[in-house]
Image: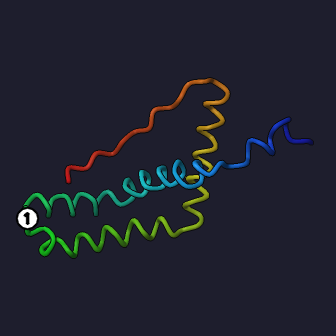
Amino acid sequence: MEPPPGAAENSKLRHVEKDVLIPQIMRDRAKELCSDKVQAFTKCCKETGFLMVVKCREENTALKDCLVGHYADPSFYEECKAEYLKQREEYRATGIKKKRQKITSNV
């Protein structure tokens, strides 16, 4: 069975897709997966104000470790790439851009 016409063209990623759009999906998904650490850091910052740099080091380190762990995982990148390609395919088929849900942080 042959791939549909233009399939090779559709699987290529532009520079902006590789360096901007897929990493944005990675950041959003990593924040969701590390939400407990995001909340702990946010709570610490609210409670300590200007001293957050000193007093919230532990929470900040835990958050960074969680996020970087996801960013460095090749399988996580491939999942996010597949998600992006699916969104791109849907957009090309329908012309309707799917709105990205933003995770708001109170930091």
Residue type at tag 1: Phe
Image coordinates for residue 99, horizontal then vertical, percent: 45, 32
Please report the residue visible at 42 percent of the width from the left and 58 percent of the height from the top: 30
Please report the residue visible at 20 percent of the width from the left and 49 percent of the height from the top: 106
Please report the residue visible at 32 percent of the width from the left and 57 percent of the height from the top: 35
Image coordinates for residue 38, horizontal then vertical, percent: 27, 59
Circle 1 residue: 50
Please report the residue visible at 51 percent of the width from the left and 51 percent of the height from the top: 20
Q: Is residue 58 above or below residue 89?
A: below
Towards the viewer: 19 or 29: 19
Q: Is residue 48 left or right of residue 65?
A: left
Mark 1 Cα shell of 10 Å, populated few (<14), some (14-19), many (≥20): few
The C terminus lies in quadrant: bottom left
Q: Is residue 9 left or right of residue 13?
A: right
Towards the viewer: 21 or 3: 21
The N terminus lies in quadrant: top right
